[in-house]
Amino acid sequence: MSKNNDPTSFETERLLLKLTTKEDAAFLLELLNSPKWLKNIGDRNVRSVRDAEVYIAERITPQFQRLGFANYTVIRKSDQVKIGVCGLYDRKGLDGVDIGFAFLPEYEAKGYAYESALKIRDAAFEIWDITILQGITIEENLPSRRLLEKLGFSLVGTTEIPGDDAELLLYRFSRET
């Protein structure tokens, strides 16, 4: 849990997680157009810093205002570099709250995704009293599947999200797990 129960920021041994804001637009532009994001998550049609600011204003900020959680920018403490995102999402077509994560390629396979997702998973139960979390990914995204399993999620089936033709694997984790 964050030191002061502030749902806009969290801290782990190596990372700071802060609510994604307009100040993160240039970073988000880079992340949303990285090859793995485009392949595994999909094109969000964010082509400029201005597009990223609009994406934040229309998709991240309203969810935070409505539910108290959203997307968090992951910052490495040692050098203050923004390396990825992790958060909780209220997705259309998905019954329940979804945990998600994505990192720039140079910061993958270093434990940062696990460290940040574990913090967000635990905050879901401790701060927001969420009882069941879900995770979705395409079948081909083995690193994402492995991370969900390492976090304690179990594969329960498949699902589809409105406006997305991909069949997604659906994972679930409950407080009682």
Image (spheres, rainbow, N blue to C red):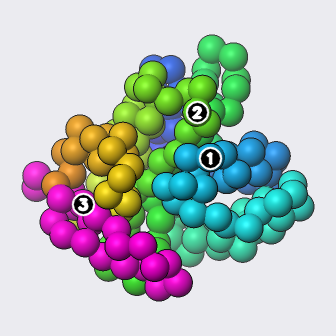
Q: Is residue 129 above or below residue 62?
A: above
| Image position of 132 (left or right of 102) | left
Residue 129: in sight, yes or no? no
- Asked if residue 169 lies in the magenta stretch, the reply is yes
Q: Which residue is found at the position 37% from the left and 59% from the top?
A: 137
Q: Which mark is residue 156?
A: none
For the residues carrying marks 1 and 3, which lies nearer the camera in this image?
Answer: 1
- Asked if residue 1 lies in the magenta stretch, the reply is no
Q: Which residue is mark 2?
A: 105
Residue 110 sits in quarter: top left
Q: Nearer the viewer, residue 108 or 9?
A: 108
Task: Give the SS element for disc 1.
Answer: helix
Q: Which residue is mark 3?
A: 171
Q: Is residue 175 above or below residue 167?
A: above
Circle nearer the N terminus (2, 3): 2
Residue 109 x %, y %: 43, 26
Circle nearer the N terminus (1, 3): 1
Q: How many marks?
A: 3
Q: Residues within 10 Å of mark 1 (few under 14, many from 20)?
A: some
Give the residue type at disc 1.
Pro
Q: Which mark is residue 35?
A: 1
Which residues are the magenta region? 155-177
Q: Spatial distance from mark 1 to mark 2, Cα to Cα? A: 9 Å
Q: Is residue 5 above or below residue 112?
A: below
Residue 121 x %, y %: 34, 48
Q: Are marks 1 and 2 in contact (CB under 8 Å)?
A: yes
Residue 140 x %, y %: 36, 53
Residue 51 sits in quarter: bottom right
Q: Are marks 2 and 3 in contact (CB under 8 Å)?
A: no
Circle nearer the N terminus (1, 2): 1
